[in-house]
Amino acid sequence: MPETPSRREGAVGEARMAEEMEAVIGLEIHVQLRTDQKLFCPDSTRFGDAPNTNVCPVCLGLPGALPTINEEAVDLAVRAAVAFGCDVHETSVFARKNYFYPDLPKGYQISQFERPLATGGSFRVRMDDGESVVRIRRIHMEEDAGKSVHDRFRRATAVDLNRAGTPLIEFVSEPDLTSPAQARAYLQQVKRVIEYLDVSDCNMEEGSLRVDANVSIRPRGSTTLETKTEVKNMNSFSGVEKALTTEIARQMEVTAAGGAVEHMTLLWDEVKGEVRPMRTKEESHDYRYFPEPDLPPLRLGRDRIETLRAELPELPASRADRFVAELGLPVYDAEVLTASRALADYFEAVAAQRGDAKSASNWIMGPVLAAMKDVGLDAGDFPVPAEALADLIDLVEGDTISHNVGKGVLRKMVETGEEAGVIVEREGLVQVRDSDRIEAWVDEVLEGHPDEVARFRGGEKRLQGYFMGEVMKRSRGKADPGEVARLLARKLEG
Amino acid sequence: MSVSKDEVSRIAELARLRPDERAIERLTRELNGILDHIQVLESVELEEIGGDEETSAASSGFRPREIEADRLGDRGPEGMAPAWREGFFLVPRLPALDQGPALDQGVEPDSGEGPDGAER
């Protein structure tokens, strides 16, 4: 029996061990392709449908049913493979991977084994302390299994086969990652590229992006690969980092105590913060792979591959570089604004309309991202079009309204879908620069707060901000702040 | 190439089959007969004919989008489910999740109740 490796996160192994050893991590990322039909049959891939309603003789593996290949899925897989610098093979072969599990109706999964779609790519991972290259061993296509639901019924597992047959690609990295933080960064950045490619929605909650990790430890400087474990069930970026930290600490503890790490599969329990053994890892030949007899080899003409390569969109790293080089944005701004393709598109549209990248960047990185967070939408669904935001920024930059009023107008634009000019006009928000009107507000405030005025004059200069706030409140945010400050200074000091 | 009785036993185990000793001997003999036959086929000179790459080049067609999925018949997936509840197939819980029955004990067909009278 394998030793039970249950342990709490945070119980880090001996410090000396941690100094002498390093982690070796490889990630297997499963990405559900954005198609509306399954890989080998025309059933819908829609998430959230009633259970077992999108099933047919093919994905259930009924006798006589024959799989046929979804062309769109193949093109999406090739697009991902060329974007990650892989060599896409003109001939690849589907294979049966045989195993028993209740949510695998055929008793085998159609995958690729000896001749995958693509091999030999690489990916640059950017972190605060520099870049590193992670080699991608292979990208292959396969169908997903169904879903086992363990918590719906008290004494049985419920199986929904709607997902069975949904197209996936699996990215297998070489074990080039050396820390949980680096693994997390790699995963986040791979996800961002896949989203840019529009290959998948990468929704981790819905299982469109799933990740397993192979983990081992070895003495620093060694090039030998030691016995690894496989960690599954990490459903978030933070989950990946925590699970790997926990598993590495466990392996160090086992090694420090003179034991040997055993080859096994572990499940990450996010709630308890621990890893638990799932089953003794089957060797790959136990899956008894053999070429899928119902499908011919997948043949792609070189022209098709090159066309898909030529159609690749600009990817986030080069887009961020361009924002810095051509638009003069700080590196930080460029990274934030390229977090998603929709956000980068939105920023570029606003910047183009205004002819000023920095003000567009400041507004989007500040009030706009805050508003998106408040309403739970991303740039693709944000109800304020780029032109409307550019008009709002014009009103602020042209001193028609103050910056603070502008932020309020943005909130109303999000709520109502109205244009900034309409809201400003209706609510009378145009900035007041008339000195007489502002002076009247200042006088009212100072007369209404004689004690504070006395304290200010007695040396409590920080009350300046308090008076400023009161005047702005009285003017409903419309008073020109510069004029308010000037008048306050004159009257208080005078 | 040939397979041993141990290899046949291991394959049977992976396939959740439990052949007895006589069946293993028979299966080993039959499988080795098949492998011998494949060896004969492999000795055929194919260079001038061309291999799999060429002969099936025309058959890698993709599925036309307009094809609809075949129906499962009037009874739907429920009709082939050993146990079914609220639209789900029911199977025994994994032993790893609790002390429930092992998976390869199977699910007894019943009237729609879950295995072991599964309850919510």
Image (spheres, rainbow, N blue to C red):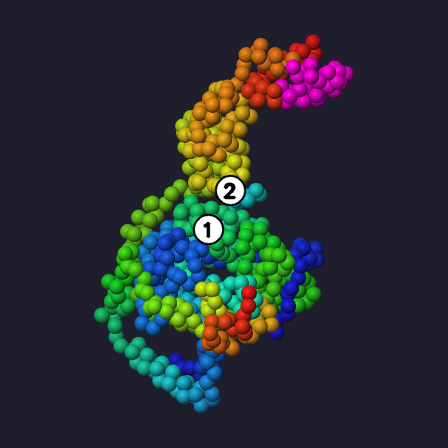
Residue at image location 66% in from the left, 19% down from the top: A467
Mark 1, Cα crowd under 10 Å, few <14 / some 14-19 / many 20+, is many
Question: Of the residues shown, which amino acid type is indicated by label 1?
Answer: Cys
Q: Say if labels 1 and 2 share a chain.
A: yes
Residue bearing the label numbered 2: A376
Magenta stretch: includes residue A338: no
Tell me if residue A145 comes above or below residue A135 in the rendering: below
Disc 2: CA contacts within 10 A as few (<14), some (14-19) or many (>=20): few
Q: Looking at the image, is mark 1 or mark 2 nearer the viewer?
A: 2
Residue A267 against residue A82 in the figure, above or below: below
Residue A317: mark: none
Question: Residue, x 60% and y 72% (percent of image)?
Answer: B99
Residue segment shown in magenta: A444-471
The residue closer to the viewer here, A109 or A177, is A109
| Disc 1 chain ID | A
Report the chain holding disc 2. A
Which quadrant, please, contains the C terminus of chain A? top right
Extreme residue in the bottom direction: B22
Viewed as shown, does residue A245 lie left or right of A94?
A: right
Residue A387, located in which quarter of the rendered image?
top left
